[in-house]
Image (spheres, helix red, strand yellow):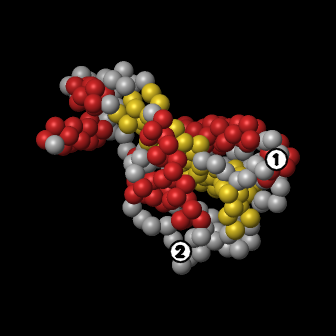
Amino acid sequence: MKITWFLRAACAVAIAATGISAAAQEKTGNKPGFTLAPGTARIVLMRPTIWVGEQSTAGMPEPNADWTTQARENIARALADAQTGLGNVVISYDEDASGEGALVAEYSHLFGAVAESVIEYQFFSGNRLPTKKRKDSFDWGVGNGIAGLKSLEGGDYALFINVHDEYGSTGRKILQIVSMFAPGAGVSSGVHKGHAGLVDLKTGELVWLNADWEMGGDVRTAEGAAKRVRQLLEGFPGRPAEAPAEGE
């Protein structure tokens, strides 16, 4: 118990010592002019892409099948509980007999790549690309080919969710503490990323995104997964005023 407390305290000091402020990074953005009134859209909740593993002493990610299964089950339950408060009709993706499962999975991964680019080149204002210098230059998408997917017919928007967690091993945490005494080492422990975004199914445009490289909530537990889902859906467009996301 004492060792665990010491590790947590030391890690917190190490992170603070880097001088990086999470508050300096934006986390939510939407396409200029985009609005979504309650009760006006049909949203398809895509199967979340979830990866959970351990970060080795050397910093290499190692998948953990049991943790990933736990996270999938916990996040599925949390999303089911959250759907009724999103203000519009939300249905879970059903491939049925279209045979498009593999292609849809590729779109899920493409969304993740786009979300990572938005974080890097839009949400960090100092990194903005020449064509996206203004804060309102939110112009991202997955391509209009998504409009041709039969399994998404009848939907107005697709809600994509990606979760990626690497829990630092004991060796990695110890290395992080040691790095505190080696200026410039910059060793971190753990990765907790999440993306949630709405894609217009007619155009393929990303119209809303909430994404962060430092999310909370241990997705291996029901309580932690519920916290993660609340964070992912913060600022969700079309949510009724009487049903706000719970703050953390």
The reply to whether residue 20 is visible in this rendering is: yes
Determine whether the residue tagged by mark 2 lies in a helix, strand or loop.
Answer: loop
Q: Residue at x 32, y 35 (%)?
A: 18
Q: Is residue 10 above or below residue 74?
A: above
Determine which quarter of the picture holds residue 99: top right
The reply to whether residue 194 is visible in this rendering is: no
Most distant residue in the bottom direction: 242
Q: Residue at x 45, y 53 (%)?
A: 225
Determine which quarter of the picture holds residue 116: top right
For badge 1, the amino acid type reads Ala
Crowdedness near tag 2: few (<14), some (14–19) or many (≥20) residues, C-alpha within 10 Å:
few
Tags 2 and 1 touching, CB below 8 Å: no
Q: Residue at x 67, y 57 (%)?
A: 92
Quarter of the image where the C terminus is located: bottom left
Real-space Cα separation, disc 2 to disc 1, in angstroms:
36 Å
Label drawn at residue 97: 1
Whole-percent x, y for residue 44 in the image: 71, 57
Whole-percent x, y for residue 168 in the image: 35, 33
Where does label 2 land, which residue? 243
